[in-house]
Image (spheres, helix red, strand yellow):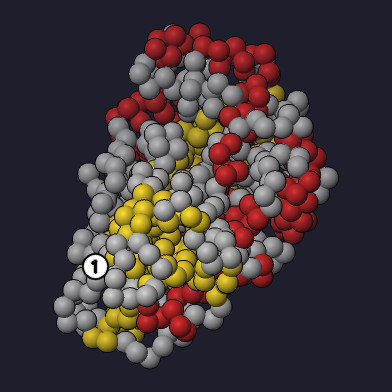
Amino acid sequence: MSMWTFLGRPECILCLSSALGVMAFLSNNQLPRLNQSHLTPLWLLTRRVGLKVKDSQFTLEGFPFRIISGTIDYFRVPRQNWRQSLRKMQACGFNTLTTHIPWNLHEPTMGRFQFIENMDLVAFITMASETGLWVILCPGPYIGGDVDLGGLPSWLLKDPKMKLRTTYKGFTKAMNRYFNNLIPRIAKLQYNKGGPIIAVQVENEYGSYYMDKKYMEYVKTALVSRGIDELLMTADDGVSLRKGHLQNVLATVRMKNINKETYEDFNFIQGGSPILMTVYTTNSFDTWGALRQLGDPQMLMKDVREIFSLGFSLNFYMFQGGTNFGLIGGAQSAEGYTPVVTSYDYCALITEHGDYTPEYQEFQRFFHSVTDFSPLTRPKATLTFAYQPLTLLYYMTLWEVLPYLAKTTKSSKPLSMEQLTVNGRSGQSFGYILYETTIFNGGLLTSRGHIQDRAQVFLDNDYVGLLDRANKELLLYKDLTKKTQTLRILVENQGRLTSGQDMNKERKGLTGDIYLDKSPLRPFKIYSLEMGNVFVQREFPKYWKTATSPVIGPAFFLSYLKAGDPPQDTFIQVKDWGKGVIAINGRSLGRYWNIGPQETIFVPGSWLHPGVNTIIMFEELKGGLKIRFTSRAQLGH
């Protein structure tokens, strides 16, 4: 098979190699076995020469080395499951872990950093080493990954002049403070210091963003000056290689927009250097209201065989996708605004909760046939359990909860989430925001595009209608028996864009004036309803009522799940509910929505207690009378 035959396929994955002529014709049976069993963190106790580029191949300690990597992002997998997932990766035949570091979760409020519990990346990297995996680290500051604002903190957007991912002083000052806290933690885990980190990626796909030609060099210097001295690499899609490339930094490519010019760009940039497919996948994320994205397993395996025959290294995205816990999922804008669902299953080699797939078995057989390595004993399959339905539910309307919220904001004009003074003056990152004002007459309510992203409108607690990106006007009929009425606008942040220059505009809530018959409404009382762990851990007022018939939202629901010892993974079925957020034992599991495709929400057994567990649901539309469980994920068709 020639390079151009490969290029001409509809998938158009690759046309990249300096040695295609010989290797492309090799069949699977003719592939030379890779003898890399001695090149693992468990064997290489004496470190001299780390990952290097030599002619058309990588070397480690001077020996030829093929990178066989898979991505697991630790923040999407419960910490208690990390080691099992890593063992499954190594047992499959992978030798390297790729993971991304989300700035927004490590510095959720300005100057306050989190590196413990599920954000303990040092523990995660250490576990990878103990499992026999090398690590390619992606510290950003931007990571993409379909997370809110690409992993950048939303509080950056408090600055009205902010230019994300540039050398704008407001951005670089915040980035330097973050790197001062992050990089010393990971520098000590580099290969030359006895750790597993063999390479570090500079930013992520900057060629497709490219607002500042000085920015990538700035980020590189920020990493190197703080002690990063392993192999550096960039990652871009096929048409953006030149823009995203840095001199003396290895360029790698993701499986997107690859064409003849990509091959020419590679030759221009780095001649016959080895090819690393940084993001190899046949699938994509799922979005609310769309059909589920499904890959083609047969094409997937065919591609991997060809990648090996061409002598490429690869990173499989994702080995395990996990879950967008705590509303961290972002949105895309390629075909209009499309928010990402809670599950990040991604049709990965192991499922959202860590179970094996048929594709895992295929990959394991293939990798074992072309490599000489010593796999760990494969961990047992992950067990799940369908708990009995919960039929005793309590509820409290949002309007009953409002008086007990700790802090509200009074403002003459609407303020966006980012402009609020909550969370140490860092503003609000996720969830909902409620605007309350008084009106004296009815008329045409007009948003003028200032609703980000979806708003329910209420008059004296009664639902009136919806405003969003498509619906920008709503007719209000005033009750003539009342002198005034309370107008409430409940706005949901459905996820900030994860890529593109429009990220700079991604402020949420009411981002400007809203008008009633062409007059801007004034003033407002604003409630922050972040729906994160801190919010759901609060003490709710003791006014819960038993739900005996369907309750119209917005409302909070409370119920109790009794689990055995040890508790097991399970899934909450949400088909009888409308739209909202679920939390268990003070941890936000994520959002649900009856438009699909996702129909279940993953509940990690490690987040349950033996005995009684507290479930709180915030339902926007109409609540069910039961909370049902299942042992199988239902993510759509």
Q: Please name the residue shown 61% across and 23% down the image.
A: 241
Percent of width and height locating residue 569: 33, 67
Q: Tell me the amino acid under the disc marked 1.
A: Lys
* Front residue (pair 563, 637): 637
Q: Residue tagged by mark 1?
A: 622
Percent of width and height locating residue 181: 74, 59
Image-based side of 116 in relation to 520, left or right: right
Q: Please name the residue shown 57% across and 44% down the image.
A: 505
* Front residue (pair 514, 297): 514
Count of marks, rendered view: 1
Percent of width and height locating residue 485: 37, 72
Most extreme residue toward the bottom, as rendered? 542
Image-based side of 280 in relation to 595, left or right: right
Crowding near pointer 1: few (<14 within 10 Å), some, many (20+)?
some
Question: Looking at the rendering, in which quadrant would you find the C terminus?
Answer: top left
Q: Please name the residue shown 72% across and 64% down the image.
A: 111
Q: Please name the residue shown 61% across and 70% down the image.
A: 422
